[in-house]
Each structure stands twice: as C-alpha cells, then as structure tokens.
Image (cartoon, coloured by chain):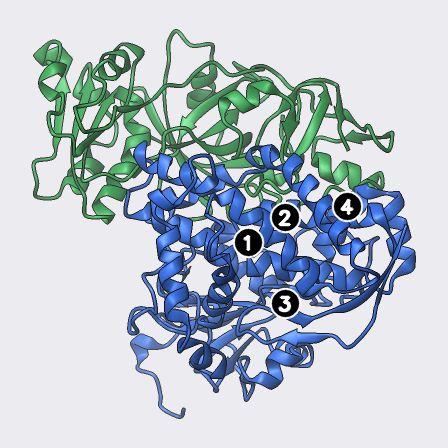
C-alpha cells in the first residue's frame, strides 16, 4: 500500500554489492528531507501489493550517510527460505517504485566507549557500518570481526578497507576456507572495550552469553524480532474520535490527522514526521499500524497509543480517545 | 564590496543580494517591543544581514523552519548564541545537548528524550494536577487581585519541576536567576549580561552542585539520568551536564510559557467561558499562546559550508540568527497572524524549535501549563487585567516582570 508522501519512499537506485546482496538507495517520495536517524537505526519497509510478501513489514538497518538528509541506504540479502520479502526487493520492485515505510527506530544505539569491538555475521554488517564511521569521526579505536560463509557473499568489504585506513582493524573470517571461527578468542578482557554485534541468532546467543567483563558493560546486540501485526493493512479505514463522536474516512494518501482535520477535529502536531511526540493519542479500539520513531517494540505491542501524524490502522476501524 | 571574485570562487548562479539592516536585536528598544522590528526583518527580504553584530538573519516561517531542521548545514556546536565557539571561549562548558552536533549529540538526546516522553511523564500527571489545585486554592484564599507572574506562573513550575528532577529544597531561588543569565548569555555582552555577571558566581556554583549524583534524590529524573550513565548509555562526564540542561532550560521557559497563556486569556471572557466548558481546547490554548508569544525568541546557528536559503548563498562559518517569534507571526504561514484565535490550528509553530534540537522538555511545558490552567478554570469564572503589563527584558526570552490581574471566583 502506498500512503502519503511522508510515509513513502521511492527506490532511487539498486546495485549488487555481493553475491545475493543488493544495496537500495531510497528517497522521500516528495524528494525532501527524510526523518533523521542515528547509527543502529532501522526502518520498517512495507512490501508492495501484488508481489511476493505483499503488505509484509520487513526491518532493514540504515547503512548510508546521515549527512545526506534526503536519502536512506539499506542492504538486502536474498533469503531463499524467506517468505518472499527479500525476493521482491531483489527482483520485483523497480527503480522509481514507491514503498511504504515507518520509523526510523533505534533499538541498537551506539553508546559511548573508549574502544569498540564490532562483530558482524553476514548481512549483520549493515547497522555496524555507520557505527564504524562514527567511531572514526569520534577518533575512537575499533576492531571488526566479520564472519561469513564466503568472502564473495560479504558486502561492503571495500568500504571497510577505506574505513580501516592504514590500521589492521578488520578481520574477515571466511568459514568456507577456515572452518568455524574461534569466537571465544575474541572475548574482550578489557572493561573499556564495548561489544556491538549483529548477525545470525546462534552468533548473537554466544556473544550475549559473554556478559560483562568485571568493571565493564555487557555486549549490545541487535535482534530483529517478529513484528506485531505483520501482513497487509487496509489502504483506507475509518477513524472515530470518541469524545466528539466524529467519524472520518482515512484515504490512502492522507494521514489520520489530515482526515480528522477535514472532519473538523484538530489534533495538534508539531514535526508531523512521528518524531517529536506532540500528537500522542490514546487508542481505544482497533490495532494501530505504527509508523513513528518513538515507541519501542514493547510499547508498540501494547497498542494503547499512537502518533496519528504518521501511524495508521491494521483494522478497518480505529477508535481514538479524543 | 566592489572586489571581483576570482573565477574559481564565482558561484554557479548569482546569489540574491542580501540587504543590510541597522537593527540591533539585543537593544533594549528591540527587546521591549520586538514586533515592529520583526515586521521589518520579515518583509525586507528572506535573508538579511545585521550590521550591528555581523550576522545573517531569517525571520520568515519557511526559512526559519528550513534553518532549524538542517543540522548538517547549520550547526549548533559552534554555539547557539552570538558567540562563535570556534573563536570564542564559551562562558561555561558547552551543553551536551543544545550546543552539540551529531554524533556527540546523539546519546544525551536519546536518553533525555526517552525520560521526558509523554508516556514517562504520565507518572507525574496526577501529582502535578493536585499541586496545581493547591496552588490555585492558595491564590484564591488571598483575594481577587494577584500578579500572574510572581503569584502563579513562577510559583507552579518552581514547586513541581525541581521535585520532578529530584533536587533538594535548599537554594531553589537560584533557578530563575540562572536560567535568566543563561538565556541572556546567548546575546552580546550588553547591560543584561554584565549586570548579572557580578552576582552569578554563587548561583553557578549551586547549579553545579545540584547536578552531582549525590545531590539528587533517588527517584527523580536526575537520578534516572545518572542511571543511564551506569548503563553506559551516556558517559559519567555527560550525566551532570544533562542534568544541568534541565535546570538551565526547564524553569524560566515554562514560567514564561504559563505567564504568556495567562496574558493571552485575560480579558477574553468569551474564550475563557468556552474553554471552561470544553477542556479539550486546553492544548490548543497553550500552543496558540506559545505561537504568538514565542517565549524563546531567537537562536543562532553557524554555517558548516556554503548554504542556500531562499536562493541566498551564505558562506561557511557565518552566524545565522533565526527569529522564531517572527516566524510564528508570518502572514505567509498564518492567516491573521497577530490574532489569538482558538479556532486556529497552531500545529507546526516553531516556538519549541524544530528538528533534532527541538525542545526536549516540550511535553513537560505542556503538562505544566495544562495542569495549572485546568485548575484555574475549575475555580475561576473570569480573568481580567488589573494594571500595566511590565515586560522582563532578556536577550533570548520574551517574558514578563509583572502581570497584574483580577479574578472572579466561580
């Protein structure tokens, strides 16, 4: 479903960056600024109707340059066992097509440290790339262990070489050639080193089990969990302002705020991008389709409030406490 | 300037000329009544140059909004006042929020934004509403005439805000002078700054003391900021500076916001009655007052590169002064911009700024103002002015010294 410009992205460019991995450059449908983000952030991408995985929500870490405010970059690995989402982004969505999106949200913030150890498994490199750039920008020492089945499947090796410069910071472990990595040998002993990791579940389980070095902090990992309310959402739906009893039809190219304003009910907004929190509204009935940057997974699952400047509905009818 | 630029420096397209204005936005004449000056700033051109301080200025809504959200081109770490921190030493260690850019800005901002989100503030709401009722009861017990600044707008935030942060009872009288000084310090070294400089030392020392972990009660927002440092979300060096940001920007601003909405609602019996009967209008009442009065009038940015605003090219390393108050009364954005209109949707005003530096305490400001107004509406049938309005001059804030009022109990 393609919604209003503030929740739609246009695929500007797609290029192959490794075996079975493409990088997508996405721009705002209106060509303007996109909501700001920080390293570790991801967007929720809503797969287009008519293709594989229609209406499904997929999370992709942002791995571009946030000093370019009008574009996002994500990398997508083809998942042969997946439900078709990655295949659609590889094969079906054409340059110029629109995709619905939510966020960006950040459950994996880069926290300050004296030194970083980044550990990536395969496509798990994506959230770590902007973190590594940030470490460079802040002149903080870092190392990266990059694990994969074969080097030809690992994205961004050239970019990492540039980021490492003259220093020996990146270790690529090619399992096809070298067998299983000795992860334990990478376990930090120095409490000043903080670990940030993203990759397959088994890798993350092992790293999480390290816990904190005495005097240090536990590793931080990014796990993409199943989405609440995955699946197609209605293009248009009904919204009811319970206090005034006003009912409005929300069309597919307008926001809940727009529709209610048309019906004579104003919700005060400020940023209108799901970032500032001004328009927070109680949800009494129906399941919101959250598109904001504010709520964490737990808060989203509660389903008791939403930000109607961007968020929509998973049900045909949504009752708000206004 | 009549020099011919070298071919390499010739811009691709000619930049529109920037008119110079002889306006000093920090003169006492300007601060006492900025509106006629705003009109000149807005109507002369999208971008003007103020010879008084050697800075560029924007005053139209679209241009102010554009400057606010473009943190890449217009940075804050070189100071959001007149001083350029690349060349001048700040009067205190810079704020890790207001006077920081990404990436350093990220961690403190995300910690504070979470702690001050509407969802987190819900735990304070019942207490604040009860405190508001007490403050209004005390006010009514003293008779019909009162000063809306000293008897109400200052009383309520000073009662609830330091408690929420978790600072002790002693020394709270330092909070208002500290905020006043900090907001003056964004301007030049004029009388407003130099006069206070002589006495601000002990106040600064007291503020510094309150930011320490040991000074903060275990359950307030201040302690939660230190807990974020324990989790490693921010550093232990950043934690006291994040607390300091709350103490700097959290009191004078909300006092001014509450005074502004009382000033707007006085002598409007129709609006008063209407809001008494329909409290769902309260958020709009406050936003409309913030739009019109714009308690925070101005902030500066510094260009990181040559940037373009409304077709005007501004070179790198220049100070750009954004007139939030003027933008909020721009007829290009607002119909009948000078009217206080409860049928207007004030969404999108820039009274709290916009973008990554937008007021992180805006939900506190709203909750305080709505709590105190709601309590007042419960017990007061009419509110009228009872004497001359006296403005409090500050280089950044547009506030009040005195708002004499008379109320009619319900």
Q: Mark 1 points at which residue?
A: B354
- Give me the chain letter of mark 1: B
Q: Mark 4 points at which residue?
A: B374
Q: Name the residue under label 3.
A: B325
Q: In this view, does B395 lie to the left or right of B5?
A: right
Label 3 element class: helix
Label 4 element class: helix
Q: How far apart in space, not on screen, are marks 1 and 2 (Cα)?
A: 8 Å
Viewer-side residue, A56 vs B23: B23
Q: Are marks 1 and 2 in contact (CB under 8 Å)?
A: yes
- According to the rendering, which colour does chain B have? blue
Q: Mark 2 points at which residue?
A: A270
Q: How far apart in space, not on screen, are marks 2 and 4 (Cα)?
A: 22 Å
Residue at 64 percent of width and 80 percent of height:
B32
Q: Is residue A202 above or below residue B133?
A: above
**Residue B40 visible in the shown view:** yes
């Amino acid at each position: 479903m393609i919604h209003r410009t503030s929740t739609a992205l246009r695929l500007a460019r797609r290029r192959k960056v490794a075996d079975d991995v493409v990088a997508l450059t996405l721009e705002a449908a209106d060509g303007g600024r996109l909501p700001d983000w920080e390293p570790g952030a991801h967007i929720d991408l809503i797969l287009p109707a008519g293709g594989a995985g229609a209406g499904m929500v997929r999370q992709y870490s942002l791995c571009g340059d946030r000093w370019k405010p009008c574009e996002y970059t994500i990398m997508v690995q083809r998942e042969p066992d997946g439900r078709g989402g990655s295949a659609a982004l590889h094969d079906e969505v054409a340059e110029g097509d629109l995709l619905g999106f939510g966020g960006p949200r950040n459950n994996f913030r880069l926290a300050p440290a004296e030194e970083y150890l980044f550990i990536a498994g395969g496509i798990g490199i994506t959230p770590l790339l902007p973190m590594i750039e940030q470490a460079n920008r802040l002149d903080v020492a870092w190392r990266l262990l990059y694990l994969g089945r074969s080097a030809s499947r690992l994205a961004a090796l050239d970019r990492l070489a540039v980021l490492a410069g003259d220093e020996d910071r990146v270790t690529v472990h090619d399992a096809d050639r070298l067998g299983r990595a000795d992860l334990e040998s990478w376990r930090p002993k120095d409490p000043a080193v903080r670990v940030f990791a993203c990759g397959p579940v088994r890798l993350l389980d092992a790293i999480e089990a390290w816990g904190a070095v005495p005097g240090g902090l536990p590793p931080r990992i990014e796990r993409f969990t199943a989405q609440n309310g995955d699946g197609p959402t209605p293009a248009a739906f009904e919204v009811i302002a319970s206090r005034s009893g006003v009912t409005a039809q929300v069309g597919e190219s307008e926001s809940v705020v727009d529709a209610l304003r048309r019906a004579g009910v104003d919700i005060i907004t400020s940023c209108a991008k799901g970032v500032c929190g001004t328009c927070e509204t109680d949800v009494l009935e129906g399941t919101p389709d959250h598109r904001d940057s504010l709520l964490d997974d737990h808060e989203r699952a509660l389903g008791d409030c939403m930000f109607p400047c961007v968020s929509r509905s998973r049900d045909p009818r949504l009752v708000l406490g206004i | 300037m009549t020099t011919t630029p070298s071919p390499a420096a010739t811009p691709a397209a000619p930049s529109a000329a920037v008119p110079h204005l002889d306006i000093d936005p920090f003169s006492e004449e300007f601060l006492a009544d900025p509106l006629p000056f705003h009109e000149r700033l807005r109507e002369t051109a999208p971008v003007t140059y103020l010879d008084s301080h050697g800075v560029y200025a924007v005053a139209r809504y679209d241009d102010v909004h554009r400057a606010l959200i473009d943190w890449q081109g217009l940075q804050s770490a070189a100071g959001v006042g007149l001083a350029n921190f690349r060349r001048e030493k700040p009067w205190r260690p810079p704020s890790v929020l207001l006077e920081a850019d990404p990436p350093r800005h990220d961690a403190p901002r995300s910690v504070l934004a979470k702690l001050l989100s509407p969802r987190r503030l819900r735990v304070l709401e019942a207490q604040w509403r009860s405190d508001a009722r007490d403050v209004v009861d005390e006010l009514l017990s003293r008779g019909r005439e009162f000063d809306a600044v000293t008897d109400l707008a200052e009383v309520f935030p000073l009662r609830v805000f330091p408690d929420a942060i978790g600072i002790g009872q002693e020394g709270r009288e330092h909070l208002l002078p500290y905020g006043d000084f900090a907001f003056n310090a964004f301007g030049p070294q004029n009388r407003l700054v130099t006069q206070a400089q002589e006495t601000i030392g002990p106040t600064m020392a007291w503020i510094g003391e309150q930011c320490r972990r040991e000074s903060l009660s275990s359950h307030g927002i201040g302690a939660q900021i230190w807990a974020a440092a324990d989790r490693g979300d921010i550093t232990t060096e950043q934690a006291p500076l994040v607390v300091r940001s709350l103490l700097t920007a959290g009191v004078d601003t909300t006092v001014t916001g509450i005074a502004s909405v009382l000033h707007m609602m006085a002598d409007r019996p129709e609006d008063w009655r209407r809001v008494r009967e329909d409290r769902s209008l309260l958020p709009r009442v406050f936003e409309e007052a913030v739009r019109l009065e714009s308690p925070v009038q101005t902030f500066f940015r510094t260009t990181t590169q040559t940037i373009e605003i409304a077709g005007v090219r501004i070179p790198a390393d220049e100070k750009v002064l954004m007139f939030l108050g003027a933008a909020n009364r721009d007829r290009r954005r607002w119909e009948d911009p000078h009217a206080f209109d409860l049928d207007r949707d004030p969404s999108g005003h820039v009274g709290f700024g916009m973008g990554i530096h937008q007021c992180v305490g805006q939900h506190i400001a709203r909750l305080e103002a709505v709590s105190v107004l709601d309590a007042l509406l419960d017990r007061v049938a009419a509110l009228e002015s009872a004497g001359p309005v006296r403005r409090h001059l500050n280089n950044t804030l547009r506030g009040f010294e005195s708002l004499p009022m008379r109320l009619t109990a319900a």
